[in-house]
Image (cartoon, rainbow, N blue to C red):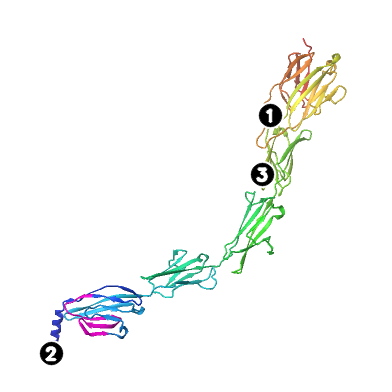
């Protein structure tokens, strides 16, 4: 019966608890170690509740308005200020160990109990931040490297790492763990200035340290420069100033040595720049740059070749001459000297021949080369030059001059103006017989003029023949081809008995039969000067025939 009434009373009491106690707190709280922490609480309750504070374990409790009910644990004795008319507390002279989550609980008859958490963080001011790097030498390729951020005192909420002013994020190469920065598989790019920045709500601190990573030397890069050569990596010319520069990535900076060829001799210039002033042919060869890093005890070598050329002398010289009695032309082209020798080649001839420095080439059937460009191509590794020749069949312009002498005697000059190169070989014939200097017959230095002294119409008027032996040609300028002016009528003067006569003659070309007689007419003396076609079976020589007719 008693149990039944007890159960009934409990049910009645529970039915009467219809509301919970309302609790409000100010938090979270942050204080500097040694300062007081005011954990203020307000509540709403229809009765005077029972108060309990816990930091994991219960450390204080009391009934609102009853000082005698206050109980404080030994941990907070003399460090806790309590106004029993409220639910708030003040922790005096906070310690770092006071940081944590505090729980306040209120309970009262007829109300549901309530509880609330308040976070308290006790900070120590940050002082003397320092970044620590390993004291041992750090080398490229080391598996790991750890940098540590420390401070003499301080509690931090945030810690950030920076490299050369840029914030570091955690990745596969850089790992952030608490106050450490771990670098995996160290590379030369890891060198730089690292800083650590720590903060809490009351102050912050920063520190930095330089990190040096040793590496190299890498295989050197050698460059060649010349004072006058456009492509010194291919060749340089004699007497130019050549500069070889060697560069190798290394920390500490590499030391450089130069050697010639593959020799191990290192007693050579110890600078990254090697200068060859007025380089000569015997300085061509293989140059090696040796880069060393004493810190890492490493040595590497890079070899390069210096090619020295010398241009041949001056400009190419080309010429042609007639050989084998005019049956052939001999072409000659020279560009002597130099290293290596220039390769000479004639373009436009029947054979494709090549020779060093000097090429002589004979060409048959020269008549087929008339007014054709023949080019001498001179090729040297440092330059290419040409020389042009243009074979030209001769242009023959005959004229004659009679000078009256005393006692009815006179001297007759027959002149053959021949435009040709090489010079034509000129011979004079009378009645098919070659004339020679004797008696009253004489010649100019090149046989272009025939002088007949004491000229007698009766004795000296014969059939004259002019023989030219010459395949032909004329040297031209490099930058173009000069062509002779077009054929035109020519005039010559004859003096006879103090009267002036004019001869008008068309030009002739040697080596061809005349299609019909060509006459030069002296209008004053009424005398023809005829050039006749050879009779059948005759030699290939133009015939000069002079008719005399007394003035009328």
Structural distance between the alpha carbons of marks 1 and 3: 28 Å
Residue 15 vs residue 24: left or right? left
In the image, what residue occupies the spot 61% across and 59% down?
A: 246
Q: Which residue is mark 1?
A: 484
Give the dominant element type of the magenta stretch: helix, strand or loop. Answer: strand
Q: Earlier in the sequence, mark 3 or mark 2?
A: 2
Residues at circles 3 and 2 in contact by the CB criterion of under 8 Å = no
| x and y, in percent, of residue 258 in the image | 66, 61
Q: Which residue is mark 2?
A: 2
| x and y, in percent, of residue 438 in the image | 87, 24
State the SS at label 3.
strand
Q: Which quarter of the image is occupied by the C terminus?
A: top right
Q: Earlier in the sequence, mark 2 or mark 1?
A: 2
Q: Which residue is mark 3?
A: 384
The 10 Å Cα crowd at callout 2, few under 14, some 14 to 19, many 20 or more, is few
Residues in magenta? Answer: 42-71
Is residue 404 shown in magenta?
Answer: no
State the SS at label 2.
helix
Structural distance between the alpha carbons of marks 3 and 2: 133 Å
Looking at the rendered image, the disc whose residue lies closer to the viewer, 2 or 1, is 2
Specify the farthest residue to the top: 552
């Amino acid at each position: 019966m008693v149990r039944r009434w007890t159960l009934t009373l409990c049910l009645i009491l529970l039915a009467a608890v219809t509301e919970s106690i309302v609790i409000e707190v100010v938090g979270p709280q942050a204080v500097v170690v040694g300062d007081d922490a005011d954990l203020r609480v307000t509540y709403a309750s229809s009765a005077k509740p029972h108060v309990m504070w816990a930091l994991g374990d219960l450390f204080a409790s009391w009934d609102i308005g009853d000082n005698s009910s206050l109980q404080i644990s030994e941990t907070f004795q003399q460090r806790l200020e309590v106004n029993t008319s409220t639910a708030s507390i003040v922790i005096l002279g906070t310690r770092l160990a006071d940081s944590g989550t505090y729980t306040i609980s209120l309970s009262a008859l007829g109300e549901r109990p309530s509880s609330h958490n308040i976070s308290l963080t006790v900070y120590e001011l940050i002082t003397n931040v320092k970044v620590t790097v390993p004291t041992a030498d750090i080398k490229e390729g080391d598996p790991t490297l750890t940098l540590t951020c420390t401070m003499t005192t301080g509690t931090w909420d945030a810690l950030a790492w920076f490299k050369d002013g840029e914030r570091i994020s955690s990745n596969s190469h850089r790992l952030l763990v608490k106050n450490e920065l771990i670098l995996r598989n160290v590379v030369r790019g890891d060198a730089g200035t690292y800083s650590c920045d720590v903060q809490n709500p009351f102050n912050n601190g920063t520190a930095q340290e330089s990190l040096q990573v040793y590496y190299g030397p890498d295989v050197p890069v050698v460059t060649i420069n010349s004072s006058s050569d456009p492509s010194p990596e291919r060749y340089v010319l004699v007497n130019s100033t050549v500069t070889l520069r060697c560069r190798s990535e290394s920390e500490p900076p590499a030391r450089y040595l130069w050697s010639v060829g593959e020799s191990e001799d290192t007693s050579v210039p110890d600078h990254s720049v090697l200068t060859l002033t007025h380089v000569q042919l015997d300085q061509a060869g293989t140059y090696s740059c040796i880069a060393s890093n004493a810190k890492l005890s490493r040595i590497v070598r890079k070899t390069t070749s210096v090619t020295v050329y010398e241009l041949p002398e001056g400009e190419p010289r080309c010429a042609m001459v007639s050989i084998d009695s005019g049956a052939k032309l001999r072409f000659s082209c020279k560009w002597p000297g130099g290293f290596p020798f220039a390769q000479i080649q004639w373009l436009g001839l029947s054979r494709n021949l090549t020779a060093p420095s000097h090429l002589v080439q004979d060409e048959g059937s020269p008549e087929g080369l008339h007014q054709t460009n023949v080019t001498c191509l001179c090729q040297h590794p440092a330059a290419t030059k040409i020389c042009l020749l243009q074979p030209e069949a001769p242009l023959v312009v005959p004229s004659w001059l009679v000078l009256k002498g005393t006692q009815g005697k006179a001297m007759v000059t027959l002149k053959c103006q021949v435009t040709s190169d090489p010079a034509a070989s000129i011979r004079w014939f009378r009645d098919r017989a070659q004339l020679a200097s004797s008696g009253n017959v004489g010649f100019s230095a090149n046989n272009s003029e025939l002088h007949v002294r004491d000229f007698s119409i009766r004795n000296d008027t014969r059939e004259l023949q002019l023989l030219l032996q010459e395949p032909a040609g004329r040297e031209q300028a490099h930058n173009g081809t000069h062509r002779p002016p077009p054929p035109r009528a020519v005039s010559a003067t004859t003096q006879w008995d103090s009267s002036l006569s004019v001869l008008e003659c068309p030009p002739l070309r040697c080596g061809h039969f005349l299609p019909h007689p060509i006459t030069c007419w002296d209008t004053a003396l009424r005398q023809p000067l005829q050039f006749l076609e050879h009779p059948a079976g005759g030699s290939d020589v133009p015939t000069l025939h002079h008719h005399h007719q007394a003035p009328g």
